[in-house]
Image: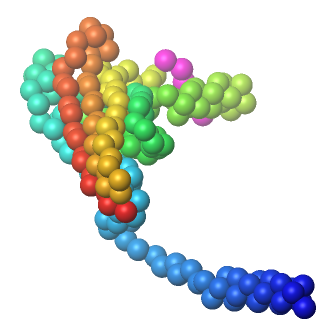
């Protein structure tokens, strides 16, 4: 009799579990990518975009740019280098770099050249064209636009927590360096602090 009761209880528990699983529904809707939504409190797309826009705007409005234009009678050429993630969580630094590049391009105040893997891919394509494309249509070597400055940086974080409450501070540091002289012409810093309560 005891065995039967145990068996019945197991069946009942399994049925409840199945019913609960079936009743769980997921809703998906399209939203505006520019809309700010914080679900986890972690670094997100809004942080990446806003920090990039603010720091690029600060960099472009400092004296180094006008000094360069006065001295050379043209806009500076910039390459965005590495932005290293040294925070406690995974951050897609490549997305942040794309946001910086977009802000630079949209400003119309500088010229931007590609760096890193994208530049290597372009050079491989040029090498392929040298071998396989007609002489008249092949892209030529030694025609790249050299950068005057490189932007580099880091993303760090500080976490402070007690029981179910936590603050996370993300600090982004960027620098602009003259590639020819190694002179740092601009240093920028932006911090975002979040309070999370579970």
Residue 25: give x, y in percent of width and height: 59, 84
Query: Of helix, strand and loop, which mostly describes the magenta segment?
Result: loop
Q: In which quarter of the image is residue 105?
A: top left
Which of 187 and 7 lies nearest the eye of the viewer? 7
Left or right: 51 with respect to 59? right
| Residue visible at 22% across and 17% down in the picture | 184
Quarter of the image with the N terminus in it: bottom right
Q: What stretch is highlighted in magenta?
A: 137-142
Left or right: 35 with respect to 60? right
Residue 139: within the magenta?
Answer: yes
Residue 30: within the magenta?
Answer: no
Residue 112: give x, y in percent of width and height: 34, 34
Left or right: 84 with respect to 69? right
Which of 128 and 5 lies nearest the eye of the viewer? 5
| Residue visible at 16% across and 38% down in the picture | 58
Q: Quadrant of residue 79?
A: top left
The figure's colour scheme reads rainbow
Residue 92: give x, y in percent of width and height: 47, 44
| Residue visible at 29% across and 22% down in the picture | 149
Which of 9 and 76 lies nearest the eye of the viewer? 9
Question: Furthest-top residue in view?
Answer: 181
- Residue 26 at least partly seen: yes
Question: Furthest-front residue in view?
Answer: 1
Residue 133: give x, y in percent of width and height: 68, 32
Left or right: 124 with respect to 111? right
Quarter of the image with the C terminus in it: bottom left
Q: Quadrant of residue 164?
A: bottom left
- Residue 11 at least partly seen: no
| Residue visible at 52% across and 78% down in the picture | 28
Numbered circles on residues, count: 0
Which of 2 and 95 lies nearest the eye of the viewer? 2
């Amino acid at each position: 009799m005891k065995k039967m009761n145990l068996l019945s209880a197991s069946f009942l528990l399994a049925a409840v579990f199945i019913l609960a699983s079936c009743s769980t529904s997921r809703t998906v809707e399209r939203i505006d990518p520019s809309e700010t939504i914080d679900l986890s409190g972690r670094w997100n797309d809004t942080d990446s975009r806003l920090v990039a826009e603010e720091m690029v705007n600060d960099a472009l409005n400092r004296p180094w740019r006008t000094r360069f234009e006065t001295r050379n009678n043209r806009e500076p050429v910039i390459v965005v280098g590495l932005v290293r993630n040294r925070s406690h969580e995974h951050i897609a630094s490549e997305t942040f770099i794309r946001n910086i590049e977009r802000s630079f391009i949209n400003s119309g105040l500088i010229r931007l050249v590609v760096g890193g893997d994208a530049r290597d891919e372009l050079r491989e394509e040029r090498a392929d064209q040298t071998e396989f494309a007609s002489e008249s249509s092949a892209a030529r070597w030694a025609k790249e636009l050299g950068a005057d400055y490189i932007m580099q940086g880091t993303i760090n974080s500080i976490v402070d927590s007690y029981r179910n409450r936590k603050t996370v501070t993300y600090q982004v540091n960027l620098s602009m360096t003259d590639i020819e002289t190694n002179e740092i012409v601009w240093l920028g810093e932006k911090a975002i602090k979040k309070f999370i309560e579970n």
